[in-house]
Image: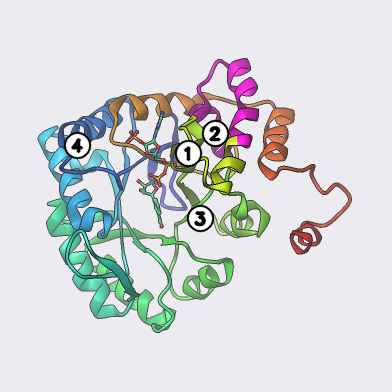
Amino acid sequence: MRMVEFGQTGTEVSAVALGCMSLSRERIDASKATVRRAYEMGINFFDTADIYGIGESETLLGEALQEAAIPRDEIFVATKCGIVLQGMEPAYTYKAYDLSPGYIKASCEASLQRLGMDYVDLYQPHRIDYLTHPEETARALEDLKAEGKIRHVGVSNYTPDEIRALQAYIRLESLQTEFSLLHLEPIETGLAATCQATDMTMLPWSPLGKAVLTGRPVSHDDWQEQRDYGVVAQLRPFAEAYGLTLGQIALAWLMQLPGPVIPLVGTANPDHIAEAAVAVDVVLERDDWYELLVIARGRPMPWGQRPYTYLKER
Ligand SMILES: NC(=O)c1ccc[n+]([C@@H]2O[C@H](COP(=O)([O-])OP(=O)(O)OC[C@H]3O[C@@H](n4cnc5c(N)ncnc54)[C@H](OP(=O)(O)O)[C@@H]3O)[C@@H](O)[C@H]2O)c1
């Protein structure tokens, strides 16, 4: 497995990570087998969150790692906090965001308990909370670091300005953001550049476009899915030329960006994580990389224009 440095931590993590959002009791055997298979393929980076399955994803990840007797110091576990749920399963709704110190500390304790771990390697505010000053959020996170409960801090779904505001008080090692050939905002809006400028590792979520980029059949009633499927159809010749699956070419395209960029591949199918692991060694020709970008954009590059002119025109 190709390994990369995570942020400025000096810690090496796998170039692709297992996204654990879809681990579930309904697919318990497959879920646990996926965690084991990921580890066997050399993937040591696992991403979850307190809200995934209302805690079930953290619990299952912890159980799977323990049952497979995987040494704690060989893996890198990331989780998140800050989205407040209301109501009982399955009728819960997202209620609010909370990154106040008390909420963060209680969330961290609860996550550690579900995971069955003394610490997590990466702790991430899931979404910004407008009602908490970044200095307060940073102080709580620094406290957790000092107590040895979290090793590193990253953010999720923050804008460049929001990143800078929190970075004024605490070192951030990573950013999670939706990013794929179906969602180009991070490179169009300067988010990727913001990460590069401060050695933050980008962690694209839904890197397979929630399976549309693997060729999953799309809904005929959904114009966005229809549009996305048009992109997928144009990826096929590239996948064939490189001898890859559609999903592998979509992941390879992301990983080629400097950064590093570590896709969070969401699956509870062992064969699917094994397929993703192979993509870490693929290098696309520069021309092909840009041609895929043009396909994803749905129109040629704005040669001669500045990107923001293009954005205004959209
Ligand atoms: N920070 C955030 O706000 C945020 C939001 C969403 C997600 N995330 C993170 O990102 C991870 C991935 O996101 P995601 O699950 O939304 O999207 P994704 O990785 O783009 O797609 C996951 C879907 O693709 C399918 N799939 C995966 N590999 C496949 C293959 N080789 N062939 C066919 N189907 C395949 C999976 O089904 P199978 O299970 O059947 O393989 C699943 O339905 C999550 O687990 C989570 O860690 C973070």
Q: Position of residue 262 (x, y in %)?
A: 47, 42
Residue count near mark 4 (Cα–Cα under 10 Å), binned few <14, some 14–19, many ≥20: few
Q: CA distance from mark 3 to mark 2?
A: 22 Å
Q: CA distance from mark 1 to mark 4?
A: 20 Å
Q: Position of residue 226 (x, y in %)?
A: 58, 41
Q: Which residue is mark 3?
A: 200
Q: Which residue is mark 2?
A: 250
40 is higher (above) or lower (below) than 106: above
Dot in front, 3 or 2: 2
Dot in front, 4 or 2: 4
* Amino acid tagged 2: Ala
Q: CA distance from mark 2 to mark 1?
A: 7 Å
Give ligand 1's quarter of the image.
Answer: top left
Query: First in sequence: mark 4 or mark 2?
Result: 4
Dot in front, 3 or 4: 4
73 is higher (above) or lower (below) than 139: above
Q: Is mark 1 within 8 Å of ligand 1?
A: yes
Q: Are marks 2 and 1 in contact (CB under 8 Å)?
A: yes
Q: How many labels, in total? A: 4
Q: Is mark 4 within 8 Å of ligand 1?
A: yes
Query: First in sequence: mark 3 or mark 2?
Result: 3
Q: CA distance from mark 3 to mark 4?
A: 34 Å
Q: Position of residue 112 (x, y in %)?
A: 17, 58
Q: Name the one closer to the observer, 170 or 244.
A: 244
Q: Which residue is mark 1?
A: 208
Q: Which residues are magenta?
A: 230-255
88 sits to left or right of 256: left
- Residue that appears at 14% across and 55% down: 114
The quadrant the C terminus occupies is: bottom right
The quadrant the N terminus occupies is: top left
Residue 185 quadrant: bottom right
* Amino acid tagged 4: Arg
